[in-house]
Image (spheres, rainbow, N blue to C red):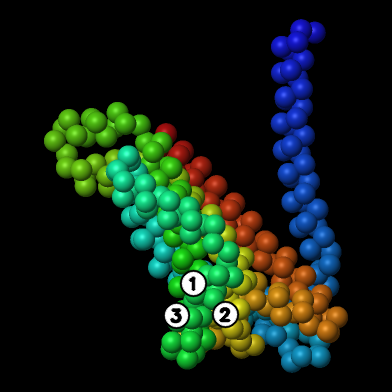
Amino acid sequence: MTARKLKNSLMGFLVAASAGLLIAVLAVIVWHIFISGVRYLNWDFFTKAPAPFGESGGGVFNAIVGTFLITLVAAAIGTPFGMFAGIYVAEHRGQRFADIVRLCADALQGIPSIVIGIFGYTFLVARFRSYSALSASVALAFMFVPTTARVTEEVLNLVPSGLKEAAYALGARRSSVVWNVSIKTAAAGITSGLLTSMARIAGETAPLLFTAFGSRYIEWNMLRPMSALPLQIYIYASSPYPALQQQAWSAAFVLVLLILLLQFGAKHLIARVLRVKA
């Protein structure tokens, strides 16, 4: 065997081993969470509010509702800002202000989530003297925007320049080229970025501690304190009651399952869009 073939075989083995290790780690984590909390994975766990402390039973339906509401509102707030920032940077590459926007997005991505939580508490909770799900959504939106902006920029940079040049040659305005050529061509990638950003903020705990605060009741009003799965997991895991600690594992499994389903839905949506375009 020649040295070239040996190197090729070695690299192929390393790539396959790395992929297998990644799958194995995810499988071990999900399996351990499932085994640790399978006792409470029943219909009541998904459809009922928590039982009083010290009593068995109850569920996390209030936290599931809160997770969906807080995440969806955060995405609704952050999507326009993130997309428009990404479009601006992609369409003005090389300009000084575009470089500043990119730098700010990268810096905001690196800010710890607990700092975002303190920011939300200082400027929203303390100012209005009330914990609320809306303040949690605003805090999470600050984490949603930079990821969405960077993904939107990178996806738009992949749009073939020939498509845009052809549109300009036909007399199209810049705004028309952006919306009818760039955005439509990169729609699948942008959607994937949005769903990935949602999956990221859905698992954050620190901002919720300072803003949403939590509630043992099923709450639909965004102006009141509200629970969420990461917050419920933190509270149950810190509890001295073994039953609540086991329920924390069950809630962790539900959270991981929701995030995996969100990621799978993103991939399925992208594949479907690409098949329709083809």
The quadrant of the image that shows the N terminus is top right
Distance, label 2 to label 1, CA atoms, is 10 Å
Distance, label 3 to label 2, CA atoms, is 11 Å
In the picture, the disc for residue 180 is none
The quadrant of the image that shows the C terminus is top left
**Which residue bears the numbered disc 2?**
210
**Which residue bears the numbered disc 1?**
139
Distance, label 1 to label 3, CA atoms, is 10 Å
Q: Amino acid at mark 1?
A: Ala
**Which residue bears the numbered disc 3?**
123
Residue 20 falls in image quadrant: top right
Q: Residue furthest left?
A: 171
Of the image marks 1 and 3, the number of the one nearer the N terminus: 3
Of the image marks 3 and 2, the number of the one nearer the N terminus: 3
Q: Is residue 28 left or right of residue 211?
A: right
Label 3 residue SS: helix
Q: Position of residue 115 (x, y in %)?
A: 55, 70
Q: Is residue 210 left or right of residue 28?
A: left
Please name whichever residue, 244 or 49, is drawn nearer the observer in this view of the structure.
Answer: 244
Q: Position of residue 255 (x, y in %)?
A: 66, 66
Q: Amino acid at mark 3?
A: Phe
Q: Residue at x 40, y 61 (%)?
A: 79
